[in-house]
Image (spheres, rainbow, N blue to C red):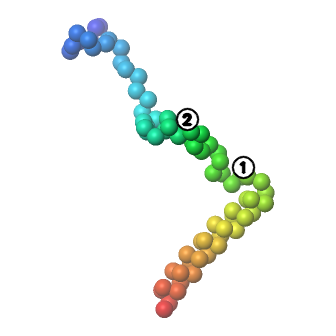
Amino acid sequence: MKTNKFHETQTEDDQHVDDEKLFSPLEDLQRIEGLVPKRNSFQLSTLPKGIQIIGYMMFGCMFMLVLVVIFINIFS
């Protein structure tokens, strides 16, 4: 069964649309300049052991600081 064309220039096959990728005009410029970060560069498990420990300590200290600020605001 053939579908009816609405226009003379309409193609019979469906157009492939890549919905997963959002177009960003800056993406091409960043790739040309070499500024696009790698996806695995933000994972602490890929870093050396000493940097991992420093990263975990920094995140832990920030978390503790937030808890202290909340505690002080509640009880003061």
Q: How many marks?
A: 2
Q: Which residue is found at the position 48% from the left and 85% from the top?
A: 73
Residue, x 53% and y 84% (percent of image)?
71
Q: Is residue 33 left or right of residue 57?
A: left
**Amino acid tagged 2:** Ile
Tell me the quarter of the picture where residue 52 sits.
bottom right
| Residue plotted at (64% across, 73% down) | 61
Q: Farthest residue in the right direction?
A: 49
| Residue closest to the eye, 33 or 26 | 33
The reply to whether dot 2 and dot 1 touch (C-beta < 8 Å) is no
Residue extending farthest to the bottom is: 76
Instruction: Give coordinates of residue 12: x percent, y percent.
Output: 32, 11
Pick out the residue farthest to the top.
1
Identify the residue shown where x is 56% and y is 39%: 33
Residue under numbered circle 2: 32
Q: Is residue 37 above or below residue 76?
A: above
Looking at the image, residue 37 lies above or below residue 48? above
In the image, residue 75 sits, relative to residue 70, either above or below, namely below
Which disc, if any, is residue 25?
Answer: none
Q: Closer to the N terminus: mark 2 or mark 1?
A: 2
Looking at the rendered structure, the kind of residue marked 1 is: Thr
Name the spot of residue 50 as percent of width and height, x first: 78, 60
- Element under disc 1: helix
Position of the N terminus, as image quadrant, is: top left
Cα distance between the residues tagged 2 and 1: 25 Å
Displayed quadrant of residue 11: top left
Give the left or right position of residue 26, taking residue 60 as reference. Answer: left
Q: Which mark is residue 46?
A: 1
Left or right position of 16 against 56: left
Question: Residue 63 location, x and y as percent?
Answer: 60, 71
